[in-house]
Image: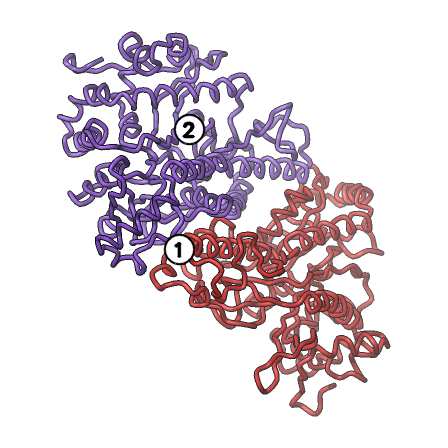
Chain colours: A purple, B red
Amino acid sequence: MCTLALTPGCHYCSVPLVCCLNIYGSLVYCFGMSSLSLPPAEAERCAGQFLAKCYELGLVMNEAVGSGTTHVSTTLQPLTISRAEFDELCHVQSLWNEAVDNTARNFSFLRDALRETAASDDGFTGKLVDILVKVYLGTKPYQKLMLGIFRTDYMRHEDDNGVGLSEASRWRNVEINTISCSFAGLSPLVTKFHEHVGVHLHVWRKANGIVGEKDGSTVSKASGCDGGLVLERSTSGRVVPGAIADAVHAWTKQQKFNLLRESYSQLQACTGCGNDSPQGKLDASPIVLVVVQENERNMADQYALLLKVLEEHHIHFIFRTLQELHMSMKLHYINPNQPPLAVVDGKYPVAVAYFRSTYVPGDLPTDAAWATRLDLERSSAIKCPSIPHHLLTFKKMQQLFCDMDRVLVPIAFRGDSDKARRLKRHFVPQYSLNPCEVG
Amino acid sequence: MCTLALTPGCHYCSVPLVCCLNIYGSLVYCFGMSSLSLPPAEAERCAGQFLAKCYELGLVMNEAVGSGTTHVSTTLQPLTISRAEFDELCHVQSLWNEAVDNTARNFSFLRDALRETAASDDGFTGKLVDILVKVYLGTKPYQKLMLGIFRTDYMRHEDDNGVGLSEASRWRNVEINTISCSFAGLSPLVTKFHEHVGVHLHVWRKANGIVGEKDGSTVSKASGCDGGLVLERSTSGRVVPGAIADAVHAWTKQQKFNLLRESYSQLQACTGCGNDSPQGKLDASPIVLVVVQENERNMADQYALLLKVLEEHHIHFIFRTLQELHMSMKLHYINPNQPPLAVVDGKYPVAVAYFRSTYVPGDLPTDAAWATRLDLERSSAIKCPSIPHHLLTFKKMQQLFCDMDRVLVPIAFRGDSDKARRLKRHFVPQYSLNPCEVG
């Protein structure tokens, strides 16, 4: 669903304001304050101003310790990339989406491909595969709609002489993320931050009588661009909330929600189970359930998306941990031909379950947490991601994609070898060290 | 310069998210979370969301202890006020500006009026009056241009039965602020915050099947208004930076800056004093000097204004404490008919000195600080505020304004009794307890 975007933060470096440039989180270049060619005393003053700009923009995250807030680590200047390369990488994203979705929906292939991994990691991968088998390879109806918000991370390949290749194919994928993809909310703000740095450098140089000198900055004109360069703003902050809202509308239509609500009331009246809803009725509109971690640091990024779901699409959202849901969520089997309706707090029907949690073992510490995760997958809610989509985030699947003849063409692209070839240009070959495994 | 605005924060109450509504900082109403008619558990969850919204908007300030950041205390909902009352209060602001400016420029009246106060507070008021006398009642040229950014605080008067009067005159002034007026930068964000709360309540009620019920909220429609009400956004975040930029342009023109720069170079070459500027030349463009406190908490508000001065008007600004300026600022007497040019760091010519400090005795702890303050007043920089404007912030001056015949008509309005009468409607009478004093 995402278009290509420059994201703040970096997995490889977390020095405040002296950080790395990322495309979808991958390390490309290091730019520190020194790249701005400022005297040390001036650079120190700039750091305070740039910090203030981060706060003005809402480019913040919770501190690791305590209840405080700090700025998000970000680059000071953008990376230049040719329009052709950029457009090609944006276009390639739809191939990634297709490959991930096709493979995820081949449930038996997915189960078989992950059999060895599941056996060697029965506490996490194994349990996720269990849910896959129970929900998607059983006999009960399951929700066929899935919402995918994916982020692919690239590094730029250079030849032995350190010279970059000239084509889009030099961008090599190092990671596919299919769950809890971060920074879709904050990425557009990084462009605004870069604009500010550009204007600041321009005005500072003018105020210091340094105009027109070579200075090493990518963006130095007050307009935010230099020599025909354009600051490209990520659309992720608008597109992702739009996709979540679209999923809510698709669910409402698919479930014939008004009829479903009536059936729910009748069922509650019959069974006398309506005691958790004062009137035994479902007055609420369909909502987005955001499944979150305890002590989440990246709250601003999550809220940047969800506040737009609320403000621009007028859809209610609730944040809940798995632990809270274990107490407050119930599945209601209303129609035998449909998966059960998930209702939270006895009143909120869940249209979309958006996971910003459950991607590391620590998020599922108890059997109760796993039971709740299974309930969510069984429910009629559209999952973002579903367990099948989630499983594609495992490195094992990316290694299998490297097998052109047995996986990429027949499974990921259902026989379309042209699409497979176009995507494969961006692969860094990955190999299994276990000869017994598929691939 | 300011138009009327709802401001965050409150001098009288600082409970986070359960605070008071202000017009120019004055207490009007208390609105807590309880005013939103939400169940306690829901209210608790809302607090987290509203906090996130504050961070998204940049509605923050530094914490009192440590280096952390927190949200600005703000009301949850706006106050309703009739269009006629609002427009009248905006209009009255220009009368305040006129009264303050006329009185401030009557230097000998100002000196005499504050004589007793100065004598009884020789450590602060006395020293400010000393600067008034030295700079404005001496024989040397002084900068006649002054930049005023004023904020007037009102409280709404109600009769003995607790019923409000129906006219604009029920708004009674309790404070004139002429120095370091806070929250001009953040005020427009409060409206965005109120919009968010309005949309949230609307969507929350819809999601809970509560539509059209009486709920006590002023703003409940998704559009941010209800029953013909309009959320009025303060223009202060745009108008104040614009006024600062206008002052820089006025100074550049008044000082014939290009010629001044040449004279400066010649003077430096003649006297051999150019050792603090590598080339003995003034390469820099005129700048805004922001005189700040150590450990300022309200940084976001200051930056909200100054970042716009930079980004929209392409004018460089520097933040300096008086202590820093004592070491780094020099006055250059270039033309005997003009006040001296203030240059900071041997390169920045100061067009505007904007004070977000020096309004409490603690800001001027040493003789060196007072000497630097005097130097700034002597300089050609346009002060915001000048010492005469600053002195109008003293309660003594507001008490004198209550004397219609001897002060308000002849001094503040130079004989225009009609204007004096219109302004006097908003006075809460103030009296001196000292029969010897003027007024």
Query: Which residue is at a point 34% across and 28% down the rendered structure image?
Result: A177
Residue drawn at point x = 73 percent, y = 43 percent: B272
Chain of residue at mark 2: A
In x, y percent, where is residue A421? 39, 9
Please tell me which residue lies in front, B271 or A308.
Answer: A308
Counting from the top left corner in percent of width and height, residue B268 is at 75, 43
Labels 1 and 2 positioned on one and the same chain: no
Q: Give the amino acid at mark 1.
A: Asn
Can you identify the residue that label 2 sits on? A24
Residue B102 found in image quarter: bottom right
Query: As drawn, is A228 to the left or to the right of B272?
Result: left
Of A139 and B314, nearer the camera is A139
Q: CA distance from mark 1 to mark 2?
A: 38 Å
The residue lying toward the viewer, choosing from A15 and B78, is B78
Q: Residues within 10 Å of mark 2 (few under 14, many from 20)?
A: many
Q: Quadrant of the C terminus of chain B?
A: bottom right
Identify the residue at horizontal 27%, vertical 26% (top origin). A394
Q: Position of residue B351 (x, y in %)?
A: 72, 51
- Determine if residue A8 is in view: no
Q: Residue furthest bottom?
A: B435
Q: Is residue A85 above or below residue B360?
A: above
Q: Secondary structure at mark 1?
A: loop
Where does the N terminus of chain B fall, quadrant-wise? Answer: bottom right
Comparing labels 1 and 2, the label whose residue is closer to the camera: 1
Please name the amino acid that badge 2 sits on. Answer: Tyr
SS at circle 2: loop
For residue B208, the mark is 1
